[in-house]
Image (cartoon, coloured by chain):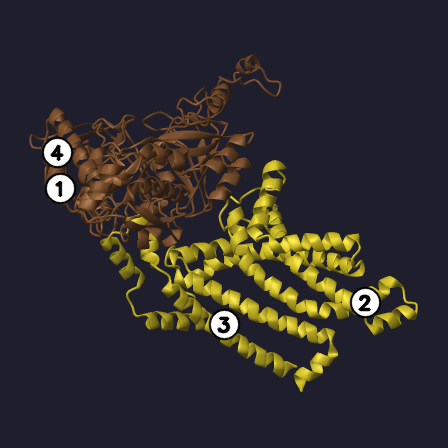
Amino acid sequence: MIRYVLRRLALAVLTVWLASLGIFLAVHALPGDVATQILGRDATPQAVAAMRTELGLNEPLWQRYGDWLSGALHGDFGTSLVTHQPVADELTLRLRNTLLIAALAIVLGIVLALVCGVVAGLTRDRWPDMLISTLSLAGMSMPEFVIATLLALAFAVAIPIFPAVVTAGPDATVAELLPALWLPACALSVVMAAYIIRMLRTSVIDTMASEFVATARLRGLAPARVVLRHALPSALLPTVNVVAMNIAWLLGGVVVVESVFNYPGLGVLTVDAVHNRDLPVLQAIALLGAATYALLNLAADVVAMLLNPRLRRRAVA
Amino acid sequence: MTSISGGGISRRTLLGAGGAAALALGLGACSSGNSAGSFSSGAASGPARKGGVLRIARPPASSGELLDPASSLSAYEYLGALYNRLVRRGASGETVADLATQWEPNADATQWTFRLRQGVTFHNGKPFTSADAAYTIKHILDPDTASPQAGVLSIVDPASITTPDDHTLVVGLKTPHAEFPTLLTHYNCYVIPDGSAASIGRTGIGTGPFALKSFTPAAQGEVTANPDYFGGRPTLDGIVFSAIADVQARVNALLAKQVDVLAQTPLDHANAKAVQAGADATVTEIENAQINVLPMLTTAAPFTDVRVRQAFKLAYDPASVLTVAAQNYGTVAHDNPVVPDDPYYADYAVESDPDKARWLLKQAGAENLRLDLYTSNYQSGFTPLALAFKASVARAGITLDIKNAPSDSYYTKVWMKRPLCVSYWYTGRGIDQLLNEYFGSGSSYNETAWKDSTMDNMLGAVRREVDEAKRKQLYQDAQKYVVDNSGLLVPFFGSRLTGLSKQVVNYAEDGFEFDYQNIGLKA
């Protein structure tokens, strides 16, 4: 098992490196560079030339990538081309802010999904299932920014319980951000939960129809015990990967949702960095995203093994 | 006029409660002075409470934005609160005193002398002198600043800027300019302290009505009233600026009462209706706020031929474009970018004539012309304008294919690169700067790439002319020449619908400049 995890970690490093190369080339392929993007209509040839020289944009592509890579290997992610601040400092604050939303969204999303998924599975084709299935289909089909906007209009404008936007910057304290977490987290958890509910419902229906559940029932175990102790661990198995992918999806989902709420997190930073072609910032974000994906996938597989001893033995062999 | 009484509040109660401002707002919302429709033009005026903090939402210039007024990365909304210029534009386009009280040229307008206001201090307590004024101009001209205004001020000879005494500034010019002070009314020309180039981007030390308390680029900042302001203490105690990049998020912030004013946020019709429907927010129409243009690149086929350019100007009906694209929130411009209330405005128009346009195209060998018209969602008005223009020129047998380009690279990859696109400018520039920037062959903003020696000569002649009446004639001739020959299509001047809280009184702006001195919250 340890050898397996180590091999997967090595693969993860390779994935992350490939992602960094990919994003570097992709940003390079976008029209314009940081100088023309920032200056916009004021991009006189002199101003653009001065800025390119200042930022070292005239050096060859591979040299710039090499410089970045050797810095990153030493834990130095460079300085933003726009703010001239160290990328690591900027990212740390933003990451903290986004993790606040993400953590809340994950907790809300998983609790919602577990409850609704199991209820729907157990009440197959009856009204609770119909209701949950319809709502989760609606949640899946609506883009997260629509849900976010609707939530803002409902709970910030019509019934002013939560703030519609964050007016403070990224250095706001957690206490300042606390009231602003709920709407973005709800928007994300609705979309996230919708997928998991669909998966879990099917899984619960299959498991409840299986022989070992029938046996447990026939032996007269209490229905709650049958569901929680015997059926659920088995039903969760195929769901774990979906949960992991959805948590990783959060990183992308926050991009849009944070913009709607002007939330000073990674998402807004990403949009800004793409717009400005701010390569060092984008590289660091991409690295973070790729590492999250790789590690969450690994974590999902490990959890799956823990839930199912058969998988464990096969992986070791 | 419709009744304003509703919800159990009679007109008398409103008046009796000292709600003159509320009344003005209510009336404005119900009946507008112009024929266009339902939004009030000009904001509520009336008694403002002493003090209070105004919250303004603004789009960040970039995450690298600065408080250096000369920089192209300047955080625009802060500038008017923090700084003063030597001279500024008055309400009807004339040049009026700010830190300079008097100015006069020598006989051939190659040297200008400015008398400066006495007893003015910067926010750090240092007195304002001619050295600061001289430094400001040199700072703009410094290549390291890369100021967008450097090109316009390149007629200044930096070596000839002298300060005979603490309150006199003399500026020598390389070429005569009888309207030179108008070039100093631009927002890049706010006065900064002597020697402050390295720090001004963060400190924001000026002489203005408000002093900087805090500033974080692309985030939040605050300014507080300057009790020693030479124009008198401002009405407000302070202003909080919040950077909100997304337009819809800005509108939501206003509706949720988190901010009071939306800066640089032209509302499209749908959003304006939504704001107007809100209980605590309203919409104000700023007339002639924006010059809507379609630049025809004179270096690209088919616009290299002046007859094709003339045909395009004759082909469309500006009134119908204004109606279709902007629901009549605007004024027809007749391809002249000078606003009608400018003192030098030429009332000259070539009436729309699609048959003549057809004939001209035939002469130019460009019958049944088919062309791409580029647009983008850079501004909400772009695509409606493109569609309205396309529909209107169809009468003259011109087929335009609308191409939607990504907004984030529109001004680097489409504008001044494609033969025909949609664009805009904010009004508020003096006529000399405007004509030179759009049509001078050396300008980097000459978006039609028009290099025309007659135009350059006209612009040079008007600068040399010191007689006011003759200068007016020359400016008007230049405008007529522009209408007849240039590559700039100017269908209309757009009004800007801007959203603000009903608590805000005495809101006024020219171009994009707020009157920070008098704006206040309802008493």
Residue sitting nearer the eye, A152 or A165: A152
The answer for which chain carries disc 4 is: B
Determine the residue located farthest toward the left in the rendered image: B107
Give the CA separation, mark 4 to mark 3. Answer: 63 Å
For marks 2 and 3 on the same chain, the one whose residue lies earlier in the sequence: 3
Residue sitting nearer the eye, B397 or A110: B397
Residue assigned mark 4: B462
Give the CA separation, mark 3 to mark 1. Answer: 57 Å
Residue assigned mark 1: B456
Which of the two discs, 3 and 1, sits closer to the camera?
1
Is B399 situated left or right of B114 in this image? right
Evaluate if marks 3 and 1 touch, with contact meaning CB atoms under 8 Å apart.
no
Chain in yellow, by letter, is A
- Name the secondary structure under disc 1: helix
The answer for which chain carries disc 1 is: B
Determine the residue located farthest toward the bottom in the rendered image: A317
Type of amino acid under label 3: Val
Type of amino acid under label 1: Asp
Residue sitting nearer the eye, B314 or B433: B314
